[in-house]
Image (cartoon, rainbow, N blue to C red):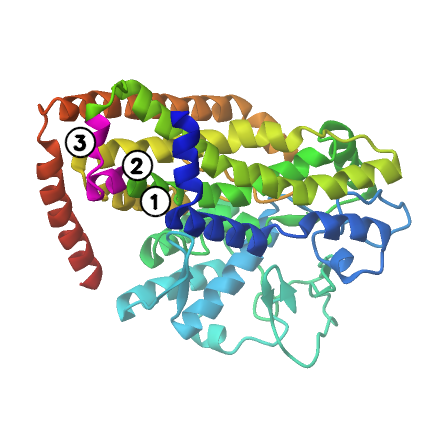
């Protein structure tokens, strides 16, 4: 009865309504209708979605006579050096460098000495001097180069320069290469990576010159028929179709569950104090462990239930697709991925919020969790970059199931560590709350004082 009473209180609260809004908004912005589009693209080859550089729908069986089979992630040194140099030169000319330290855009303007260092990097890579770099021919770089589009009237190719049209890159063929007419790297790939690391150190973490970002934008290569057929086979038979969509769904939802549940935990433990419920709770014959655990489970249920419901927007079209095509899918893929991928994240966030709020009697957990979330966002790549203490697992693609299999041991250890943290935070919450109920703990008052000091210093630092 206590569990259902707590669950009802949570579900009919304002803070939970705000949590639902933020959760649904993030899902709608990123994942809504993705499954329908993929299914539609697999049936209608003329749809615009099919013509994206992703190579079309993962559900479309490759045709040997197709002009293109899409693209795959592949580290081709010449392509990476071409794209990275092009992008660095563009930002150098504007002295406006984009960085994403915590997943959000920030402009960086370098001083004269730093600009000179960037110029030296460009000169070493291209073998050109400053005057040449400011007066490059229009076709020095390809018309379309990864995520870069050079707007010019002509796209000449009289010397065999690389060109890309409609997401397709023609092979660069030059009988005689001239570094003043077309980009020809003058350094080895290892030296190029050293120079990019030097540029990143000056510009800041989260710039476009980390190898992860360079491979994201320029580490792409055309697939042949055999490679495309293998991708299709993995999607249909290894992923059972639905697992690919479940991974992408969890990738987007994990960003919400990595932060927003802490507000639910903080508000409900703080509400007892504001409504003077502590005396009533202390007077009842509820064991401390029972009270803490029941409230935690109620909050966890409230946070995870809408996630399961949102997954039906993708699962139902996949079930229909399976019925029409005869291709079997894993109907429980979303349930399984949500339980092992997302639940540990939500659990550790809620338990941390519970522990810090009980300890300090102040919303310190919001600040702590926000810092953890920002750090985790800024330090974790979009896929294949899970560490033992990563809060949010990322896999921002429908393809790449091999990355999950390769990192499976790390993933399971990571989720186990998050659940261990959850248990520790809940155990400490029970110990501290029991002492408070018996009047033996004054951490709450000192915690409020320390929180006010910390908050003041934190926001003062931001203003500076």
Compared to residue 182, the image places residue 11 above or below, namely above
Compared to residue 169, the image places residue 355 above or below, namely above
Q: CA distance from mark 2 to mark 3?
A: 22 Å
Asked if disc 2 and disc 3 are in contact, CB closer than 8 Å, the reply is no
Q: CA distance from mark 3 to mark 1?
A: 23 Å
Of the pair 438 and 411, the residue shown nearer to us: 438
Asked if disc 2 and disc 1 are in contact, CB closer than 8 Å, the reply is yes
Q: Residue at x 47, y 32 (%)?
A: 301
Of callouts 3 and 1, which one flags the residue occurring earlier in the amino acid sequence? 1
Of the pair 82 and 441, the residue shown nearer to us: 441
Stretch in magenta: 269-282
Label 1 CA crowd tier, 10 Å (few <14, some 14–19, many 20+): many
Is 147 magenta? The answer is: no
Label 2 CA crowd tier, 10 Å (few <14, some 14–19, many 20+): many
Identify the residue under disc 1: 263
Q: Residue at x 22, y 36 (%)?
A: 277
Q: Quadrant of residue 359?
A: top left
Name the disc covering residue 353, or none: 2
Is label 3 in a helix, a strand or a loop?
A: helix
Q: Residue at x 51, y 40 (%)?
A: 394
Name the disc covering residue 279, or none: 3
Q: Quadrant of residue 336?
A: top right
Is label 1 in a helix, a strand or a loop?
A: helix
Dominant SS of magenta comes to helix
Of the pair 6 and 164, the residue shown nearer to us: 6
Foreground disc of the pair 2, 3: 3
Q: Quadrant of residue 433?
A: top left
């Amino acid at each position: 009865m206590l569990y259902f009473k707590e669950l009802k209180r949570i579900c009919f609260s304002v803070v939970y309504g705000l949590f639902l809004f933020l959760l649904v908004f993030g899902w709608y912005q990123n994942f809504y209708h993705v499954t329908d589009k993929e299914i539609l693209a697999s049936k209608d080859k003329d749809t615009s979605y099919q013509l994206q550089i992703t190579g079309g729908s993962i559900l479309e069986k490759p045709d040997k006579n197709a002009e293109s089979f899409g693209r795959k992630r592949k580290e081709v040194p010449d392509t990476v050096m071409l794209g990275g140099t092009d992008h660095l030169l563009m930002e150098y000319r504007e002295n406006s460098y984009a960085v994403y330290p915590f997943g959000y855009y920030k402009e960086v303007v370098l001083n004269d000495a730093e600009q000179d260092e960037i110029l030296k990097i460009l000169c070493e890579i291209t073998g050109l001097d400053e005057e040449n770099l400011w007066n490059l021919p229009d076709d020095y770089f390809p018309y379309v180069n990864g995520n870069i589009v050079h707007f010019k009237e002509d796209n000449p190719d009289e010397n065999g320069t690389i060109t890309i049209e409609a997401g397709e890159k023609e092979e660069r063929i030059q009988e005689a290469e001239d570094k003043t007419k077309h980009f020809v790297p003058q350094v080895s790939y290892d030296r190029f990576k050293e120079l990019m690391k030097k540029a990143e150190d000056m510009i800041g973490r989260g710039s476009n010159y980390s190898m992860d970002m360079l491979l994201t934008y320029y580490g792409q290569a055309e697939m042949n028929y055999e490679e495309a057929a293998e991708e299709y086979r993995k999607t249909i038979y290894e992923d059972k179709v639905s697992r690919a969509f479940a991974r992408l769904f969890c990738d987007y939802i994990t960003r919400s569950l990595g932060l927003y549940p802490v507000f639910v935990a903080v508000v409900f433990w703080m509400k007892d104090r504001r409504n003077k419920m502590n005396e009533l709770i202390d007077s009842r014959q509820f064991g401390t462990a029972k009270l803490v655990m029941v409230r935690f489970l109620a909050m966890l249920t409230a946070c995870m239930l809408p996630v399961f419901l949102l997954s039906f927007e993708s699962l139902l079209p996949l079930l229909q697709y399976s019925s029409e095509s005869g291709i079997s899918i894993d109907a429980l893929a979303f349930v399984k991925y949500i339980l092992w991928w997302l639940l540990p994240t939500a659990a550790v966030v809620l338990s941390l919020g519970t522990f810090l709020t009980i300890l300090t009697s102040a919303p310190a957990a919001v600040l702590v969790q926000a810092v953890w979330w920002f750090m985790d966002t800024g330090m974790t790549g979009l896929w294949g970059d899970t560490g033992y203490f990563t809060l949010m697992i990322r896999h921002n693609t429908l393809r790449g199931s091999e990355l999950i299999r390769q990192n499976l041991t790390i993933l399971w250890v990571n989720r186990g560590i998050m659940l261990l943290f959850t248990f520790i935070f809940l155990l400490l919450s029970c110990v501290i709350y029991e002492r408070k109920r018996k009047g033996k703990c004054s951490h709450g008052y000192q915690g409020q004082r320390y929180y006010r000091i910390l908050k003041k210093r934190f926001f003062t630092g931001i203003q500076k």
